[in-house]
Image: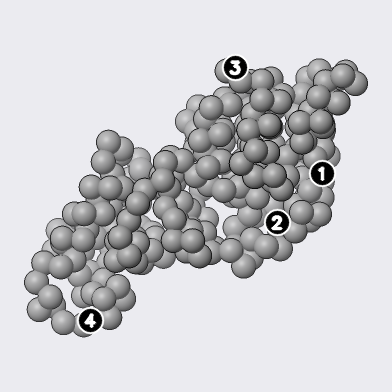
Amino acid sequence: MSAVSGAREAGPGAVRVLIVDDEPELTELLSWAVTDAGWQPFLAADGHGALGLARGCAPHAVVLDGMLPDLDGVQVLRRLRYENAGLPVLMLTARDTLEHRIDGLSAGADDYVTKPFSLEEVMLRLRGLLRRSGADAAAADESVRVLGDLVLAEKTRQVRRGGEAIALTAKEFDLLHFLMRHPRQVLSKAQILDHVWNSSFESEGNLVEVYVYSLRGKLDKGRPPMIHTVRGAGYVIRAAGEGR
């Protein structure tokens, strides 16, 4: 399973929930429930993928399986807690023992659900964690844009793709921000000049082409491309792998 499999586009205000489990059927069910709640699901099938994805998507909450194929769930929980002490985490486990529950709660889990579980119960507990942490309300004021594995934080002007930080110049960031505000929409050179450089003159030469080329070099290098040229029309940004 891809680390961002099932992730959908989310604009500012979306509550992001990281789901970490190596059971595809269960992950699909949880992803559906999270989406139905109006939240943004991000999926990881192992501990290392979860840690990388958490750094990239900055989740508001995590649903974490206690048994993963590479790292123990408690190990993942401790690392998540080290990087974000206030991140709400709901642990899932097939081991219904007091000792295991104590281990998870001691490592920083906010709540604990034993498999098999009721989907309604998981969602109720998750809503409670978001409400108590204030994450649900805070998300409405947070300017974070997500497209596939690309995350742009407007307030901090930080960009990550696949969990990896990407350093951009001020104008490269402004250009990417404008493209991400209009995903899958073809934007002309004139529109880009007007919104990014506050200029309506096409006499700026190849300014747009130069910056698009530079942005592609940083954003798409070694990865499936996201920024595409539409000959004679302009440029468009899409999640990697999306059709035209």
N-terminal of the two: label 3 or label 4?
3
Residue at 19 percent across and 54 percent down: it is: 213
Residue shown at 32% from the left, 56% from the top? 168
Three-letter amino acid code at disc 4?
Answer: Ser
The extreme right residue here reads: 98
Report whether residue 119 is seen.
no
Dots 4, 1 in contact, CB < 8 A: no
Q: Earlier in the sequence, mark 2 or mark 1?
A: 1
- At horizontal 11% and vertical 67% (from top left) the residue drawn is 206
Q: Earlier in the sequence, mark 1 or mark 3?
A: 3
Tell me if 237 is positioned left or right of 206 in this view. Answer: right
* Residue type, numbered disc 2: Ala
214 versus 221 height, above or below: below
Q: Which residue has dot 1 on it?
A: 125
Q: Position of residue 204 (x, y in %)?
A: 12, 75
Q: Residues within 10 Å of mark 4 (few under 14, many from 20)?
A: some
Q: CA distance from mark 3 to mark 2?
A: 29 Å
Q: What's the amino acid at mark 1?
A: Arg
Label whose residue precedes the other's in the sequence (4 or 1): 1
Q: What's the CA distance linking mark 2 and mark 1?
A: 14 Å
- Residue 127 placement (x, y as % from top left): 78, 50
Alpha-carbon distance for marks 4 and 1? 50 Å
> Taking 88 as reference, is 117 left or right?
right
- The residue carrying pointer 3 sits among few (fewer than 14), some (14 to 19) or many (20 or more) residues within 10 Å by Cα, namely few
Q: Which residue is mark 3?
A: 69
Q: Amino acid at mark 3?
A: Pro
Q: Which residue is mark 4?
A: 199
- At 57% from the left edge and 48% from the top edge, which residue is drawn? 58
Among the 4 quarters of the image, the one containing residue 211? bottom left
